[in-house]
């Protein structure tokens, strides 16, 4: 159940150039959140910046009750958040629908020991670490291939952490500073030839759009986490729409904050 | 202490409601807000047929405000009456339904459909949405058409009718007078101010709809002025004041200018508890300053005309 809370900051550090990780105490989130869900965080004290910022959950520690978010300080709001080293932050969460493998919904994963691919691009890798934590907890490490893409080597945000959990990771950078030089979707194309059972992805639209096309062509099911400008975060203001095709093939809008941010790869209309 | 107000026939236990479009159909905020604390709940603009709304991006943050161009997305009056109202009626809080249409007859049909639906305490007629091609503002920028819509809605329903005015007009008082003469039981003001923002890096408008409605603290002085002017001209027409209310002090500005009731809009997004904080803050203010009835505060600042 989502709550409005004041959570005490326990750590805040710049983990890569312009990328911040803030840790805070929120036992109810640590217990109840599902990978792919997000928090709606107040990023200022006055009226400018005005709106909360939706930021995905990066990791949870159920035992200590600590939760981490990872975000890029790009504007006034996120810069303010990055400047908070102690004290409390005002959070609504957990919000949205996470990856269905963890929400108790139908997943399309009906095979035993499924082979999974996790694809992260840029800051989109942030929520995928929580996903990897859960997959590791389920003992799935050997069945997962993690593909990470970024502009340059120091923006491969969850590379070390994924390896520490024991996952196989392949990387792609735009500038070739490490790994494959080119889009991470090129690595996915190779993986799709091995017919995985399911693909999880989060990243910028220029990555997700071709990725959804590739999954459709390969006949591989998957889920993608998308972003949209958001005001209320709870389904009231109807701002954050994502165009989808419903089961009858009719195009309609769904709301990223309550119907998403995770959508089936095949339903999103790019 | 008495905080009860009568907004043109809608009896509210305190003067605080939600601004249409910022509170969904009320239930979205139920996990966070004790809805029973609200004087009324004003729900999303409802039209005859379901509407999909505008293409994204639908919002943009601006200094101390935001632009929105949702485009009246709603499930249509039939679903509101059949599926949503039964869930809201049990709360025991008056529900005000904002209605919109493409034609005068649309407004009348929506009003007729909602007449007698349990839980509906009143209608707010939206003649001021800046974000739809037809309907909305076109009815709210000419006093004659505004009066025509008002008369049609009044004829179609026995419910109290509040007409929501746009600030995007040359003479707001003339609009207010026209709809009041046409039978409006109350007026609400202000709807959003037409605005736009441009993404300088991509060299294109931010909003999918190009223009949108500005709300939030940035518009508050415009809204307070609107309430002040209209209350001065029409002292016996109750006003539902709104525009950038975040706190009780903001709400009190509107009440002192002449608003009988107030609505919290964009403030809900920032602080889901804004409405109940405003209710508590008004009670605290009354207690601190020795007021026993909220009606003593309505329009109190009008004693000062600027001459003294």
Image (cartoon, coloured by chain):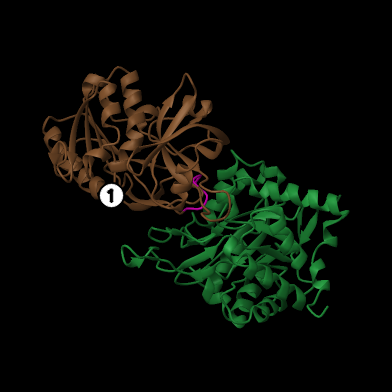
Chain colours: A brown, B green
Q: Is residue A120 magenta?
A: no
Q: Is residue A222 left or right of residue B267?
A: left
In the image, residue B256 above or below residue A130: below
**Residue A234 on the magenta segment:** yes
Instruction: State the image quarter where residue B133 is shown.
Output: bottom left
Residue depicted at 46% across the width and 21% down the height: A62
Which residue shows up at 72% across the image and 63% down it? B253
Residue behind mark 1: A205
Q: Residues within 10 Å of mark 1 (few under 14, many from 20)?
A: some
First to last magenta residue range: A233-238
| Percent position of residue A53, x then y | 46, 47
On the question of residue B95 being in view, the answer is no
**Quarter of the picture holding the C terminus of chain B:** bottom right
Which residue: 48% across, 60% down? B49
Asked which secondary structure carries label 1, the reply is: helix
Q: What's the chain of the residue with tag 1?
A: A
């Amino acid at each position: 159940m989502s709550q409005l809370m004041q959570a005490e900051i326990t750590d805040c550090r710049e983990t890569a150039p312009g990328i911040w990780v803030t840790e805070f105490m929120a036992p109810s989130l640590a217990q109840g959140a599902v990978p792919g869900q997000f928090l709606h965080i107040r990023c200022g004290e006055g009226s400018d910046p005005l709106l909360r910022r939706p930021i995905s959950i990066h990791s949870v520690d159920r035992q200590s009750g600590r939760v981490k978010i990872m975000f890029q300080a790009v504007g006034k709001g996120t810069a303010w958040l990055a400047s908070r080293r102690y004290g409390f932050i005002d959070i609504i969460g957990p919000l949205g629908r996470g990856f269905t493998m963890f929400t108790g919904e139908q997943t399309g994963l009906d095979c035993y020991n499924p082979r999974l691919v996790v694809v992260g691009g840029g800051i989109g890798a942030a929520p995928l670490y929580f996903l990897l934590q859960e997959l590791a907890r389920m003992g799935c490490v050997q069945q997962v291939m993690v593909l990470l893409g970024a502009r340059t080597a120091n923006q491969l945000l969850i590379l070390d952490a994924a390896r520490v959990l024991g996952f196989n990771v392949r990387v792609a950078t735009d500038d070739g500073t490490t790994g494959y030089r080119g889009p991470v979707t090129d690595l996915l194309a190779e993986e799709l030839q091995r017919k995985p059972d399911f693909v999880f992805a989060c990243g910028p639209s220029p990555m997700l759009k071709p990725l959804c096309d590739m999954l459709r062509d390969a006949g591989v099911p998957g889920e993608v986490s998308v972003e949209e400008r958001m005001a209320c975060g709870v389904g009231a203001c109807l701002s954050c729409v994502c165009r989808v095709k419903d089961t009858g093939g009719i195009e309609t809008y769904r709301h990223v904050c309550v119907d998403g941010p995770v959508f089936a790869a095949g339903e999103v209309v790019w | 202490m008495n905080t009860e107000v009568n907004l043109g026939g809608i009896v509210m236990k305190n003067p605080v409601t939600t601004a249409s479009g910022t509170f969904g159909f009320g239930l979205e905020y139920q996990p966070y807000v004790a809805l029973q604390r609200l004087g009324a709940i004003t729900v999303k603009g409802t039209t005859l047929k379901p509407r999909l709304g505008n293409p994204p991006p639908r919002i943009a943050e601006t200094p101390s405000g935001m632009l929105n161009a949702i485009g009246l997305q709603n499930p249509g009056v039939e679903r509101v009456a059949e599926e949503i109202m039964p869930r809201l009626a049990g709360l025991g809080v008056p529900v005000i339904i904002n209605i919109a249409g493409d034609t005068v007859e649309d407004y009348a049909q929506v009003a007729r459909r909602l007449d007698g639906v349990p839980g509906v305490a009143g209608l707010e007629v939206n003649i001021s949405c800046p974000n739809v091609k037809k309907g909305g503002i076109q009815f709210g920028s000419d006093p004659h058409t505004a009066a025509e819509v008002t008369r049609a809605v009044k004829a179609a329903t026995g419910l109290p009718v509040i007409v929501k005015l746009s600030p995007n007009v040359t003479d707001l008082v003339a609009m207010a007078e026209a709809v009041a003469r046409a039978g409006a039981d109350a007026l609400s003001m202000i709807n959003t101010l037409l605005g736009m923002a441009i993404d300088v890096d991509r060299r294109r408008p931010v909003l999918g709809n190009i223009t949108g409605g500005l709300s939030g603290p940035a518009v508050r002085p415009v809204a307070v002025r609107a309430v002040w002017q209209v209350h001065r001209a029409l002292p016996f027409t109750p006003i539902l004041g709104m525009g950038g209310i975040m706190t009780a002090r903001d709400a009190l500005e509107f009440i002192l200018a002449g608003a009988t009731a107030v609505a919290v809009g964009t403030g809900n997004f920032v602080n889901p508890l804004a409405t109940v904080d405003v209710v508590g803050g008004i009670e605290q203010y009354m207690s601190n300053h020795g007021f026993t009835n909220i009606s003593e505060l309505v329009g109190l600042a009008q004693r000062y005309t600027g001459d003294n």
